[in-house]
Image: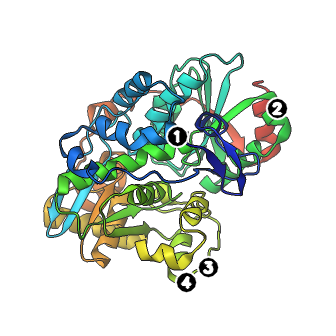
Amino acid sequence: MMKYYSTRNRARHYTFRDAVVRGLADDGGLYMPEFIPKLDASFQDSAKHKSLAEIGLEVLKDYIGDEIPEAKFGDIVKDAFNFPAPVKHLYDNYYILELFHGPTFAFKDFGARFMARVLGYFVKDYEKELHILVATSGDTGSAVANGFYNVEGIRVHLLYPSGRVSELQEKQLTTYGGNVTAIEVDGSFDDCQKLVKQAFNDTEVREKLNISSANSINIARLLPQSLYYFSAINQIGNSAGVRFSVPSGNLGNLTAGIMAKKMGLPVKGFISATNKNDVFTKYINNGEFKPGLSERTISNAMDVGNPSNFERLMKMYDESHAEMIKDITSFTFSDNSTMEAIGEVYEKSGYIIDPHGAVGYLAAKEAKSGVILGTAHPAKFGGTIEGILNMKIELPEGLNAITSKKKKVVPLAANYSTFRDYLLSHK
């Protein structure tokens, strides 16, 4: 059976259930599988005719072992991944992997839907509610809200930075109600993430509340993100020279891609694309990791000054910068360059790309080719894109339906004692 360990203490072992329900280890570390399972050499060929759910079942089963019965796990995967992830050709050697065909129009649907169903299975016999704490810089919040809405035995608390998500993103994460509470924090995403981590490190909070996380710090959010890399390779065909260009913030998508490669994904490498929050790019280029304060950009989901999943990447490369840069290159781009890229992609291909994808496109251009991860539907950033392209972006029906809904939030200062009082009032 697969065991898990904390990135800060490899000596202690945990079950998959423990890792998922706890979210963050007691020592503040992130859970990692004891080893990355290798897929059979014939997997990629056999996967060519499989659906996302069928690929997901094969990719994920060794991480779960017998902790969820096989038939039940099959149902979870089939229900979680019931939408496509198509690869589309832009022009020349540039492609985009569209990961925004789920219910909230962002790639976070893959992890959030899977995790909600797994946690729903694990907590069904709990006497006390499980409280999910989530820091979001945009799409994580809406995906988690949608995935966990009305899941019995679970209450969700979404922390997001006031004024730093798009209007549509805010509507998506603040209009559910029920077992989902949106908390509007007067601060940055890093402030939100810090509050969540402080709660996990607070002994009294952990004793009085069952708490977990649905950020990519939770292993059940991260693992499903590896499967669409396999699906993309199937669609492209010849994978020998393929590099994935990954818009990078908290590094969850990049980490999942590296896990896929270590499982056997036939890919040349990865390009980490950052905006001016470029702490990881600087690490790749000079070997120094220096977290800082995040800065606002038009690619807001990437506005992270201290990416959590860096710890996981380091563990997969045995703390070796020299080994990591064999697989990963990284480039950083300004808002002005991002806006120009949105116009360029449309001019050359007729494709409307969102700001995060545009940063990925710029990084792919540095490498002369690439499969860009399209992480969100462009309509979610209509105000920005419409100003650049001078055209109206049509809202998909699912997004249009929320525009008239009323925002419901709990305002909160970026202060842990205030957040702590809020949490303990729900014990």
Q: Classify residue 365 as left or right of residue 287.
A: left
User: Is residue 421 visible to us here?
Assistant: no
Q: Residue furthest bottom?
A: 286
Q: Quadrant of the N terminus?
A: top right
Quarter residue 289 falls in: bottom right
Tell me the tag on residue 220.
1
Q: Report, in whole angstroms, how far the alpha carbon at label 1 lies from the one at label 3.
A: 29 Å
The answer to whether marks 4 and 1 mark residues whose Cβ atoms lie closer than 8 Å is no
Which residue matches tag 4? 286
Q: Amino acid at mark 4?
A: Asn
Q: Is residue 92 above or below residue 223?
A: below
Neighbourhood count class around disc 4 (C-alpha, 10 Å): few under 14, some 14–19, many 20 upward: few
Q: Residue at x 22, y 63 (%)?
A: 239
In the image, 403 versus 118, the foreground residue is 118
Q: Amino acid at mark 1?
A: Ala
Q: Amino acid at mark 2?
A: Glu
The answer to whether marks 3 and 4 mark residues whose Cβ atoms lie closer than 8 Å is yes
Secondary element type, mark 2: helix
Q: Report, in whole angstroms, how far the alpha carbon at label 4 lies from the one at label 1.
A: 32 Å
Q: Report, in whole angstroms, how far the alpha carbon at label 2 lies from the one at label 1.
A: 23 Å
Which residue matches tag 2? 207
Mark 2 or mark 4, which has the lower sequence index?
2
What colour scheme governs how the chains and residues are painted in the rendered image of this protein? rainbow
Q: Report, in whole angstroms, how far the alpha carbon at label 3 lies from the one at label 4.
A: 6 Å
**Rendered location of residue 362, percent (x, y):** 32, 71
Which residue matches tag 3? 288
Mark 3 or mark 2, which has the lower sequence index?
2
Mark 4 or mark 1, which has the lower sequence index?
1
